[in-house]
Amino acid sequence: MKSKLLLILSLSFYLFSCNGQNTHIPAAVTSAAPVKINRFDKELFKLVDTGDSTRQAEITGGYPQMLDVLGKGILNMKSPAMPGFFDKLTSYYSEPTLKSLYADAIRQYDDVSQIEQQLGNGFAWLKACFPSMQIPAIYMHVSGFNQNVLVGDSLLSISIDKYLGEEYPLYQEFFYDFQRRLMTPEHIVPDYLAGWLMSEYPFEGKENVLLDRMIYEGKIKYLIHQAFPELTPEQLMGYTVASYNWCKENEANLWKAIIERKHLYTPDQMTTTKYFDSTPSVFLSSDAPGNIGSWIGWQIVDKYMKETDATPEALMQNNDSQAILTASKYKP
Protein backbone atom coordinates (compact mmCIF):
# COMPACT_ATOMS: atom_id res chain seq x y z
CA MET A 1 0.00 0.00 0.00
CA LYS A 2 1.41 3.34 -1.01
CA SER A 3 2.16 5.37 2.07
CA LYS A 4 1.11 8.94 2.40
CA LEU A 5 2.64 11.27 4.89
CA LEU A 6 1.11 14.46 6.12
CA LEU A 7 3.23 16.52 8.45
CA ILE A 8 1.45 19.18 10.39
CA LEU A 9 3.76 21.35 12.49
CA SER A 10 1.29 23.18 14.28
CA LEU A 11 -2.34 23.17 14.22
CA SER A 12 -3.75 26.53 15.11
CA PHE A 13 -7.15 26.68 16.84
CA TYR A 14 -10.38 28.07 16.97
CA LEU A 15 -12.98 30.65 17.58
CA PHE A 16 -16.57 31.89 17.49
CA SER A 17 -19.19 29.48 18.75
CA CYS A 18 -21.92 28.44 16.36
CA ASN A 19 -25.52 28.83 17.51
CA GLY A 20 -26.57 25.44 16.12
CA GLN A 21 -28.85 26.89 13.46
CA ASN A 22 -27.74 24.46 10.76
CA THR A 23 -30.12 21.49 10.82
CA HIS A 24 -27.58 19.19 9.15
CA ILE A 25 -24.97 19.45 11.91
CA PRO A 26 -25.18 16.47 14.29
CA ALA A 27 -25.09 17.18 18.00
CA ALA A 28 -21.76 16.64 19.73
CA VAL A 29 -21.33 13.06 20.99
CA THR A 30 -20.70 12.47 24.70
CA SER A 31 -21.01 8.72 25.25
CA ALA A 32 -19.41 6.83 22.37
CA ALA A 33 -17.13 3.83 22.81
CA PRO A 34 -13.55 4.87 23.59
CA VAL A 35 -10.90 4.70 20.86
CA LYS A 36 -7.80 2.75 21.84
CA ILE A 37 -4.49 4.61 21.67
CA ASN A 38 -1.51 2.46 20.64
CA ARG A 39 1.35 3.50 22.92
CA PHE A 40 4.22 3.53 20.44
CA ASP A 41 5.74 6.31 22.55
CA LYS A 42 6.15 4.03 25.56
CA GLU A 43 7.57 1.14 23.57
CA LEU A 44 10.11 3.32 21.79
CA PHE A 45 11.22 4.88 25.07
CA LYS A 46 11.99 1.41 26.47
CA LEU A 47 14.32 0.85 23.52
CA VAL A 48 16.00 4.24 23.94
CA ASP A 49 16.24 4.01 27.72
CA THR A 50 17.65 0.50 27.91
CA GLY A 51 19.74 0.47 24.74
CA ASP A 52 18.66 -3.16 24.38
CA SER A 53 18.95 -3.90 20.66
CA THR A 54 16.84 -7.05 21.04
CA ARG A 55 13.84 -4.74 21.37
CA GLN A 56 14.32 -3.59 17.77
CA ALA A 57 12.67 -6.70 16.34
CA GLU A 58 9.76 -6.37 18.77
CA ILE A 59 9.07 -2.74 17.91
CA THR A 60 9.54 -3.42 14.18
CA GLY A 61 7.02 -6.23 14.32
CA GLY A 62 4.55 -4.31 16.45
CA TYR A 63 4.73 -0.88 14.86
CA PRO A 64 6.02 -1.20 11.28
CA GLN A 65 4.00 1.63 9.75
CA MET A 66 4.58 3.95 12.71
CA LEU A 67 8.34 3.45 12.39
CA ASP A 68 8.09 4.19 8.68
CA VAL A 69 6.10 7.41 9.18
CA LEU A 70 8.26 8.61 12.07
CA GLY A 71 11.45 7.81 10.18
CA LYS A 72 10.38 9.90 7.21
CA GLY A 73 8.90 12.72 9.24
CA ILE A 74 11.54 13.14 11.94
CA LEU A 75 14.72 11.29 10.96
CA ASN A 76 14.55 11.99 7.21
CA MET A 77 15.13 8.30 6.51
CA LYS A 78 13.14 6.60 3.78
CA SER A 79 12.68 3.23 5.45
CA PRO A 80 13.35 1.42 8.75
CA ALA A 81 15.15 -1.15 6.62
CA MET A 82 17.91 1.36 5.78
CA PRO A 83 21.29 0.62 7.38
CA GLY A 84 21.78 2.59 10.58
CA PHE A 85 18.08 3.38 11.05
CA PHE A 86 17.91 2.32 14.68
CA ASP A 87 21.30 3.82 15.45
CA LYS A 88 20.05 7.18 14.22
CA LEU A 89 16.75 6.70 16.04
CA THR A 90 18.32 5.98 19.42
CA SER A 91 20.93 8.70 18.97
CA TYR A 92 18.22 11.28 18.27
CA TYR A 93 16.17 10.42 21.33
CA SER A 94 19.19 9.95 23.61
CA GLU A 95 20.08 13.64 23.55
CA PRO A 96 19.80 14.51 27.29
CA THR A 97 17.27 17.34 27.05
CA LEU A 98 15.05 15.43 24.63
CA LYS A 99 15.29 12.25 26.68
CA SER A 100 14.23 14.16 29.80
CA LEU A 101 11.34 15.73 27.87
CA TYR A 102 10.36 12.27 26.61
CA ALA A 103 10.33 10.85 30.15
CA ASP A 104 8.19 13.75 31.40
CA ALA A 105 5.73 13.29 28.54
CA ILE A 106 5.09 9.59 29.07
CA ARG A 107 4.94 10.15 32.83
CA GLN A 108 2.24 12.81 32.45
CA TYR A 109 0.33 10.70 29.94
CA ASP A 110 0.75 7.33 31.61
CA ASP A 111 -3.05 6.96 31.80
CA VAL A 112 -4.84 8.13 28.65
CA SER A 113 -8.28 6.67 29.31
CA GLN A 114 -9.91 10.10 29.38
CA ILE A 115 -8.31 11.01 26.06
CA GLU A 116 -9.48 7.69 24.59
CA GLN A 117 -13.03 8.52 25.63
CA GLN A 118 -12.85 11.99 24.10
CA LEU A 119 -11.42 10.50 20.91
CA GLY A 120 -14.29 8.05 20.79
CA ASN A 121 -16.77 10.90 21.08
CA GLY A 122 -14.97 13.01 18.49
CA PHE A 123 -14.61 10.30 15.88
CA ALA A 124 -18.20 9.18 16.42
CA TRP A 125 -19.24 12.73 15.57
CA LEU A 126 -17.03 12.74 12.47
CA LYS A 127 -18.52 9.41 11.38
CA ALA A 128 -22.01 10.89 11.71
CA CYS A 129 -20.96 13.78 9.48
CA PHE A 130 -18.91 11.72 7.03
CA PRO A 131 -20.39 8.18 6.92
CA SER A 132 -17.81 6.86 4.46
CA MET A 133 -14.83 8.24 6.40
CA GLN A 134 -12.42 5.60 7.64
CA ILE A 135 -11.40 5.96 11.28
CA PRO A 136 -7.61 5.58 11.65
CA ALA A 137 -5.56 3.60 14.11
CA ILE A 138 -4.46 6.04 16.81
CA TYR A 139 -0.94 6.33 18.20
CA MET A 140 1.18 8.60 20.36
CA HIS A 141 4.79 9.59 19.74
CA VAL A 142 7.37 12.09 20.97
CA SER A 143 9.06 14.31 18.41
CA GLY A 144 11.12 16.78 20.40
CA PHE A 145 9.01 19.74 19.20
CA ASN A 146 9.44 18.49 15.64
CA GLN A 147 6.42 16.99 13.83
CA ASN A 148 3.36 17.53 15.98
CA VAL A 149 0.98 15.32 14.01
CA LEU A 150 1.95 12.38 11.80
CA VAL A 151 -0.56 10.92 9.38
CA GLY A 152 -0.11 7.80 7.29
CA ASP A 153 -2.47 5.40 5.55
CA SER A 154 -5.12 4.65 8.20
CA LEU A 155 -2.74 5.92 10.90
CA LEU A 156 -2.78 9.04 13.05
CA SER A 157 -0.28 9.94 15.75
CA ILE A 158 0.25 12.99 17.94
CA SER A 159 3.40 14.19 19.68
CA ILE A 160 2.54 14.32 23.38
CA ASP A 161 5.61 16.38 24.28
CA LYS A 162 3.70 19.32 22.74
CA TYR A 163 0.99 19.19 25.43
CA LEU A 164 2.65 19.38 28.85
CA GLY A 165 0.97 22.62 29.91
CA GLU A 166 1.73 26.33 29.67
CA GLU A 167 3.92 26.29 32.78
CA TYR A 168 6.16 23.38 31.77
CA PRO A 169 9.72 24.70 32.43
CA LEU A 170 11.22 23.82 29.06
CA TYR A 171 8.39 25.60 27.25
CA GLN A 172 9.28 28.76 29.16
CA GLU A 173 12.70 28.71 27.52
CA PHE A 174 11.64 28.06 23.93
CA PHE A 175 8.12 29.38 23.37
CA TYR A 176 6.21 32.64 23.69
CA ASP A 177 3.08 32.85 25.81
CA PHE A 178 0.85 32.93 22.71
CA GLN A 179 2.41 29.64 21.61
CA ARG A 180 2.19 27.99 25.03
CA ARG A 181 -1.56 28.58 25.22
CA LEU A 182 -1.94 25.87 22.57
CA MET A 183 0.41 23.45 24.37
CA THR A 184 -2.09 22.16 26.92
CA PRO A 185 -3.87 18.79 27.41
CA GLU A 186 -7.26 20.06 26.22
CA HIS A 187 -5.83 20.59 22.73
CA ILE A 188 -4.79 16.97 22.20
CA VAL A 189 -8.10 15.55 20.97
CA PRO A 190 -9.04 18.58 18.82
CA ASP A 191 -5.60 18.36 17.21
CA TYR A 192 -6.09 14.65 16.51
CA LEU A 193 -9.39 15.32 14.74
CA ALA A 194 -8.11 18.36 12.87
CA GLY A 195 -5.12 16.35 11.65
CA TRP A 196 -7.36 13.60 10.29
CA LEU A 197 -9.75 16.04 8.64
CA MET A 198 -6.84 17.77 6.93
CA SER A 199 -5.55 14.40 5.75
CA GLU A 200 -8.93 13.29 4.39
CA TYR A 201 -9.62 16.70 2.83
CA PRO A 202 -6.25 18.23 1.93
CA PHE A 203 -5.98 21.86 0.88
CA GLU A 204 -6.63 22.20 -2.86
CA GLY A 205 -6.60 25.96 -3.29
CA LYS A 206 -3.79 28.34 -4.11
CA GLU A 207 -1.34 28.52 -1.22
CA ASN A 208 -0.46 32.15 -1.95
CA VAL A 209 -4.07 33.40 -2.12
CA LEU A 210 -5.41 34.60 1.22
CA LEU A 211 -9.09 33.83 0.59
CA ASP A 212 -8.34 30.21 -0.32
CA ARG A 213 -6.31 29.68 2.84
CA MET A 214 -8.86 31.50 5.01
CA ILE A 215 -11.78 29.38 3.85
CA TYR A 216 -9.88 26.11 4.23
CA GLU A 217 -8.65 26.89 7.74
CA GLY A 218 -12.10 28.19 8.62
CA LYS A 219 -13.70 24.90 7.57
CA ILE A 220 -11.45 22.90 9.88
CA LYS A 221 -12.00 25.20 12.81
CA TYR A 222 -15.75 25.31 12.32
CA LEU A 223 -16.06 21.53 12.31
CA ILE A 224 -13.74 20.95 15.26
CA HIS A 225 -15.70 23.39 17.38
CA GLN A 226 -18.94 21.65 16.43
CA ALA A 227 -17.41 18.39 17.67
CA PHE A 228 -16.20 19.96 20.94
CA PRO A 229 -18.52 22.86 21.77
CA GLU A 230 -17.56 22.69 25.44
CA LEU A 231 -14.19 24.25 24.64
CA THR A 232 -14.37 28.01 24.58
CA PRO A 233 -13.52 29.79 21.32
CA GLU A 234 -10.54 31.52 22.88
CA GLN A 235 -9.16 28.20 24.15
CA LEU A 236 -9.40 26.64 20.71
CA MET A 237 -7.70 29.59 19.05
CA GLY A 238 -5.08 29.94 21.78
CA TYR A 239 -6.27 33.51 22.44
CA THR A 240 -6.75 35.31 25.70
CA VAL A 241 -10.29 36.42 26.50
CA ALA A 242 -9.19 40.00 25.86
CA SER A 243 -7.79 39.11 22.42
CA TYR A 244 -10.92 37.20 21.49
CA ASN A 245 -13.13 40.12 22.51
CA TRP A 246 -10.88 42.50 20.58
CA CYS A 247 -11.36 40.41 17.43
CA LYS A 248 -15.12 40.47 17.76
CA GLU A 249 -15.20 44.20 18.42
CA ASN A 250 -12.87 44.95 15.51
CA GLU A 251 -14.06 42.34 13.00
CA ALA A 252 -15.44 44.94 10.59
CA ASN A 253 -12.23 46.98 10.74
CA LEU A 254 -10.09 43.91 10.12
CA TRP A 255 -12.13 42.93 7.07
CA LYS A 256 -12.03 46.50 5.77
CA ALA A 257 -8.23 46.59 6.12
CA ILE A 258 -7.86 43.32 4.20
CA ILE A 259 -10.04 44.59 1.35
CA GLU A 260 -8.43 48.03 1.18
CA ARG A 261 -4.94 46.56 1.10
CA LYS A 262 -6.01 44.15 -1.68
CA HIS A 263 -4.72 41.19 0.31
CA LEU A 264 -7.72 38.94 -0.23
CA TYR A 265 -7.09 37.94 -3.84
CA THR A 266 -3.57 39.14 -4.68
CA PRO A 267 -1.31 36.06 -4.97
CA ASP A 268 1.45 36.98 -2.52
CA GLN A 269 2.94 34.15 -0.48
CA MET A 270 4.78 36.36 1.99
CA THR A 271 1.72 38.45 2.83
CA THR A 272 -0.64 35.49 2.99
CA THR A 273 1.66 33.60 5.35
CA LYS A 274 1.57 36.47 7.85
CA TYR A 275 -2.15 35.91 8.39
CA PHE A 276 -1.57 32.38 9.69
CA ASP A 277 1.52 32.87 11.83
CA SER A 278 1.07 32.45 15.58
CA THR A 279 2.96 35.73 16.05
CA PRO A 280 0.62 38.67 16.81
CA SER A 281 -0.67 40.23 13.58
CA VAL A 282 0.84 43.65 14.19
CA PHE A 283 0.95 44.30 10.43
CA LEU A 284 -2.82 44.82 10.71
CA SER A 285 -3.07 46.32 14.18
CA SER A 286 -0.92 46.53 17.28
CA ASP A 287 -3.63 44.67 19.24
CA ALA A 288 -4.39 41.90 16.74
CA PRO A 289 -3.55 38.34 17.91
CA GLY A 290 -1.86 35.78 15.68
CA ASN A 291 -3.48 33.45 13.17
CA ILE A 292 -6.02 36.12 12.32
CA GLY A 293 -6.58 34.56 8.89
CA SER A 294 -7.97 31.40 10.47
CA TRP A 295 -10.16 33.44 12.79
CA ILE A 296 -11.75 35.40 9.94
CA GLY A 297 -12.05 32.23 7.86
CA TRP A 298 -14.03 30.67 10.66
CA GLN A 299 -16.40 33.63 10.77
CA ILE A 300 -17.05 33.33 7.02
CA VAL A 301 -17.64 29.57 7.17
CA ASP A 302 -19.90 29.89 10.20
CA LYS A 303 -22.01 32.45 8.33
CA TYR A 304 -22.00 30.25 5.20
CA MET A 305 -23.26 27.22 7.10
CA LYS A 306 -26.10 29.22 8.64
CA GLU A 307 -27.07 30.79 5.32
CA THR A 308 -26.98 27.61 3.24
CA ASP A 309 -27.78 24.84 5.75
CA ALA A 310 -25.06 22.81 4.03
CA THR A 311 -23.93 19.44 5.35
CA PRO A 312 -20.37 19.05 6.69
CA GLU A 313 -19.62 16.75 3.76
CA ALA A 314 -20.83 19.32 1.23
CA LEU A 315 -18.79 21.98 2.98
CA MET A 316 -15.56 20.01 2.72
CA GLN A 317 -16.22 19.00 -0.87
CA ASN A 318 -16.77 22.60 -1.96
CA ASN A 319 -13.35 23.97 -2.97
CA ASP A 320 -14.67 27.21 -4.49
CA SER A 321 -13.65 29.74 -1.84
CA GLN A 322 -15.21 32.66 -3.70
CA ALA A 323 -18.54 30.86 -3.96
CA ILE A 324 -18.46 30.18 -0.21
CA LEU A 325 -17.68 33.81 0.55
CA THR A 326 -20.47 35.02 -1.72
CA ALA A 327 -23.06 32.61 -0.36
CA SER A 328 -22.10 33.46 3.22
CA LYS A 329 -23.18 37.10 2.74
CA TYR A 330 -20.33 37.92 5.09
CA LYS A 331 -20.38 41.65 5.81
CA PRO A 332 -19.11 42.33 9.33
Image (tube, rainbow, N blue to C red):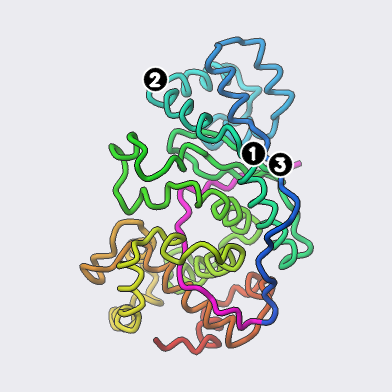
- The verdict on residue 215 being magenta is no
Residue density around tag 3, few if under 14, some if 14–19, many if 20 or more, within 10 Å = some
Q: Which mark is residue 213?
A: none
The residue singled out by tag 3 in the image is 36
Q: Which mark is residue 139?
A: 1
Q: Which residues are magenta?
A: 1-22
* Quarter placement of the N terminus: top right
Compared with 249, 148 (above or below) is above
- The verdict on residue 15 being magenta is yes
Q: Is residue 283 left or right of residue 236?
A: left
Depth check, front residue: 298 or 79 = 298
Q: Position of residue 200 (x, y in %)?
A: 66, 58
Please state which amino acid type lies under the numbered disc 1. Tyr
**Closer to viewer: mark 3 or mark 1:** 3
Please state which amino acid type lies under the numbered disc 2. Pro
Cα distance in 3D space between marks 3 and 2? 30 Å
Q: Is residue 294 left or right of residue 225?
A: left
Q: Which mark is residue 96?
A: 2
Prevalent SS, magenta region:
loop
